[in-house]
Image: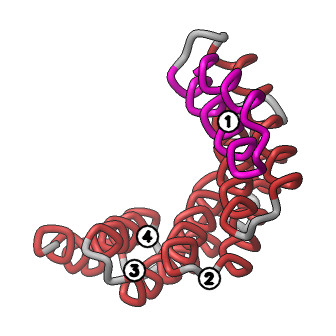
Amino acid sequence: LVQYQNSLEIRTRVFGFVHAEVAMSYMNIGNIFISQYKYEEALVQHHRSLEIKIRVFGDQDQDVAASYNNIGEVYRRQGRYEEALVQYQNSLEIRTRVFGFVHAEVAMSYMNIGNIFISQYKYEEALVQHHRSLEIKIRVFGDQDQDVAASYNNIGEVYRRQGRYEEALVQYQNS
């Protein structure tokens, strides 16, 4: 944390406040706070990073999408699922526009949204999102990839929670 804070201080002095490197420092500090379970501090850092990225790159950039994703992750860890969902959806919208539908970052966004729906007990909606994520991952990585396995596992988890044990077993075996 101290090293990232030192880096932020230097970058701000060298580049000024509105610079991609400064935004990266705020993001790194926010991620450290997430690791330390200091979620409010993490949100402050990630929001600062987002504000700078929007000013530097515009509001439709992949780095902006990553910031929305990071903020969504903090909200998810806090159990603030509706707020997390909004952030993940913002990230998905930008990623789809920037990368197209078939991209690993888009698949991750669908997975994150699916996980929010699991946490909210909205299992049918979760299945839709996790199937979308799986479809993209197979197209991007092939069917023998660890990310594909994770998607099968996520789908199996939804089926298990629904009491659809046979379907869950098939998905777990696929993973």
Q: Calculate the distance from the C-alpha at mark 1 to the C-alpha at mark 4.
A: 38 Å
The kind of secondary structure element at disc 3 is helix
Tell me the residue that label 2 is attached to.
80
**Residue sitting at x 57%, y 71%:** 76
The kind of secondary structure element at disc 2 is loop
Q: Calculate the distance from the C-alpha at mark 2 to the C-alpha at mark 3.
A: 14 Å
**Residue sitting at x 36%, y 73%:** 30
Q: Calculate the distance from the C-alpha at mark 4 to the C-alpha at mark 2.
A: 24 Å
Q: Which mark is residue 23?
A: 4
Q: Is residue 110 magenta?
A: no
Tell me the residue that label 3 is attached to.
42
Q: Nearer the viewer, mark 2 or mark 1?
A: 1
Residues at marks 3 and 4 touching, judged by CB atoms closer than 8 Å:
no
Q: Nearer the viewer, mark 3 or mark 4?
A: 3
Q: Nearer the viewer, mark 4 or mark 2?
A: 2
The kind of secondary structure element at disc 4 is helix
Q: Which mark is residue 111?
A: none
Q: Is residue 76 above or below residue 44?
A: above
Q: Nearer the viewer, mark 1 or mark 3?
A: 1
- Circle 3: residue type: Ala
The kind of secondary structure element at disc 1 is helix
Per the rendered image, the range of residues in magenta is: 146-175
Tell me the residue that label 1 is attached to.
156
Q: Is residue 152 magenta?
A: yes
**Residue sitting at x 40%, y 83%:** 39
